[in-house]
Image: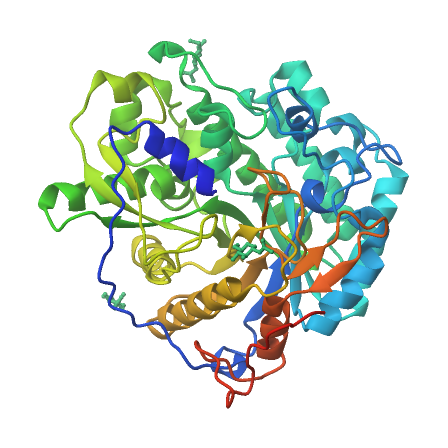
């Protein structure tokens, strides 16, 4: 989401990049055994980013296909990507050899139910049954996301997709098929991936599907809020369905997922501290408050005015209490500075009004990489614990971005994972009810913002090779060592149980 930060920052008056003294507390030396036995460590993929086979066996186009095939994209598509649709068996074997305890992946709605509504596609059903069986055979727990930016294009064309309440009925019917067909083996269900970011980036800034960039006319700029509202209604509808129809027999859990960056005040001034709370209200509270309190935060309502839909009493009751866990995708920390209201903010961009976004520059990361700032994750986990009564949390995505240039020596990814997993352990030691951690991503795949330019994988995929051969990176080896009970330390030395070797390959 690096570019998201850039685009938000673009709307600010200026960007400050600065250094902060960070009081490091992250656990440095830990092993798998420091985490509870029922804690789950895994990695993640998503359907469009991993499967390929975009036009095969009855799958129909989604808004993501349409978006990447449009003229303003750089030509990178998910037509083939890692070809997981055909190569999943080998990949599950690699996951098993790596020691993954769980895999978070998503189901392609339009592969299972072409055009989004109507009969189930037997080939799609068979693919997911095979995939889930393969995971289970290897002792890998499946965690399924139902919606990951890939709305069937047919529903977008028919009624505007997530902008219409009609989506709730179709999403419920799709979820019903998934619960019925896969719920005997899948216990962990996430309704919507990065619900907040999907609404903001898809309907305010237009840099992910469906690429809406509403006009600057304030009155018409309500799409982000309307979509957010429909996400919540759709989520709560399937949570209710699961509870009434499946929970007693299947005994699983339904949650939602948000993108959460760490937010810290730029200075210790009262204004910046209040602005930081406002940023948390906009980016976390906007969609999480209703799930716990039945309404949007006051700050958001006040700033969004009539553009944000009001909950009816019935909706509020449905939404409140409809999550068993919160899924968190975390990569970055930003610092927040107060800013005076100007008409510029009101007419352009998401109205998180007075907050100014600043990329938090910890040290000097290489170009195209994220700063390592594990206190940001700690802060998010503390915030969720303190604000929402310590709900169960799954870190569904966390990982380091690098350039996709063929190197397997991804030391910056090792450093990043080491620091963030340590910070999560610290948060858990202070009471956070975090129950799982998934590295984004298992294999280098189509990335949402820049196609194949950046990479997050534990494995490199050679796109020039007809077989799309996979190669383990240093990070894959590091994670595997950790999962298998080895010690990890931050600066591997030659005496360390695991150390960096030059010329490492495979
Ligand atoms: C959103 O804006 C459109 C166009 O101005 C309007 O028709 C619609 O009623 C608005 N929706 C909400 C929920 O405010
Ligand atoms: C690949 O990118 C990394 C930064 O992500 C850089 O350190 C490294 O030198 C690059 N390698 C090549 C071969 O370009
Ligand atoms: C640890 O948790 C307590 C209770 O929620 C909280 O008051 C305290 O600020 C936390 N400590 C840190 C260092 O986050």
Q: Is residue 498 above or below residue 261?
A: below
Image spot of residue 13 (x, y percent): 24, 28
For residue 356, side relative to residue 286 (left or right): left
For residue 30, side relative to residue 449 (left or right): left
Residue 210: quarter of image:
top right
Is residue 322 in view?
no
Residue 219: quarter of image:
top left
Q: Residue furthest left?
A: 269
Q: Is residue 489 above or below residue 173?
A: below
Image spot of residue 120 (x, y percent): 84, 35
Q: Quadrant of ligand 2?
A: bottom right
Question: Closer to the camera, 384 or 91?
Answer: 91
Image spot of residue 184 (x, y percent): 76, 58
Is residue 295 in view?
yes
Identify which residue is drawn at 38% across, 66% down: 432
Identify which residue is drawn at 52% across, 46% down: 256
Identify which residue is drawn at 10% across, 47% down: 269
Q: Is residue 64 above or below residue 135?
A: above
Query: Which quarter of the rendering shows the C terminus?
Result: bottom right
């Amino acid at each position: 989401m690096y570019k998201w930060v850039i685009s938000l920052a673009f709307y600010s008056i200026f960007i400050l990049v600065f250094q902060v003294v960070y009081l490091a507390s992250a656990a440095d030396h830990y092993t798998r055994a420091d985490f509870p036995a029922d804690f789950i460590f895994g990695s993640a993929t998503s359907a469009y980013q991993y499967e390929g086979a975009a036009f095969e066996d009855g799958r129909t186009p989604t808004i993501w296909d349409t978006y990447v095939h449009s003229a303003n994209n750089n030509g990178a598509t998910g037509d083939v990507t890692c070809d997981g649709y055909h190569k999943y068996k080998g990949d599950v074997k690699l996951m098993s050899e790596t020691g993954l305890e769980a895999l978070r992946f998503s189901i392609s709605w339009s592969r299972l139910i072409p055009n989004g509504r109507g009969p189930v596609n037997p080939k799609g059903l068979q693919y997911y049954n095979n995939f889930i069986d393969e995971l289970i055979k290897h002792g890998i727990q499946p965690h399924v996301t139902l919606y990951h930016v890939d709305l069937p294009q047919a529903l977008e064309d028919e009624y505007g997709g997530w902008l219409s309440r009609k989506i709730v009925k179709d999403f419920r019917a799709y979820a019903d098929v998934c619960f019925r067909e896969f719920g005997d083996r899948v216990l962990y269900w996430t309704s919507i991936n990065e619900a907040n970011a999907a609404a903001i980036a898809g309907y305010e800034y237009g840099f992910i599907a469906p690429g809406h960039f509403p006009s600057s006319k304030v009155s018409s700029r309500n799409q982000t809020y309307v979509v957010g509202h429909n996400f919540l209604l759709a989520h709560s509808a399937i949570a209710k369905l699961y509870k009434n129809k499946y929970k007693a027999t299947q005994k699983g859990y339904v949650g939602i997922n948000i993108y959460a960056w760490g937010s810290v005040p730029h200075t210790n001034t009262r204004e910046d501290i209040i602005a930081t709370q406002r940023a948390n209200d906009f980016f976390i509270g906007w969609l999480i408050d209703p799930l716990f309190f039945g309404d949007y935060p006051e700050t958001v309502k006040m700033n969004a005015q009539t553009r944000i839909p009001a909950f009816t009493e019935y909706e509020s009751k449905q939404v409140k209490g409809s999550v068993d866990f919160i899924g968190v995708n975390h990569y970055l920390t930003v610092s927040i500075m107060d800013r005076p209201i100007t008409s510029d903010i009101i007419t352009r961009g998401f109205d998180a009004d007075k907050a100014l976004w600043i990329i938090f520059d910890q040290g000097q990361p290489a170009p195209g990489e994220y700063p390592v700032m594990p206190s940001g994750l700690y802060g998010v986990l503390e915030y969720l614990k303190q604000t929402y009564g310590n709900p169960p949390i799954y870190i569904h995505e966390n990982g380091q971005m690098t350039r996709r240039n063929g190197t397997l020596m991804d030391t910056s990814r090792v450093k990043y994972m080491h620091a963030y997993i340590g910070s999560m352990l610290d948060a858990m030691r202070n009471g956070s009810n975090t129950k799982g951690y998934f590295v984004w991503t298992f294999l280098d795949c189509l990335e949402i913002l820049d196609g194949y330019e950046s990479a997050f994988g534990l494995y490199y995929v050679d796109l020039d090779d007809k077989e799309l051969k996979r190669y383990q990176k240093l990070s894959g080896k590091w994670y595997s060592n950790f999962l298998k009970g080895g010690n990890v330390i931050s600066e591997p030395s030659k005496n360390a149980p695991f150390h960096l070797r030059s010329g490492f390959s495979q």
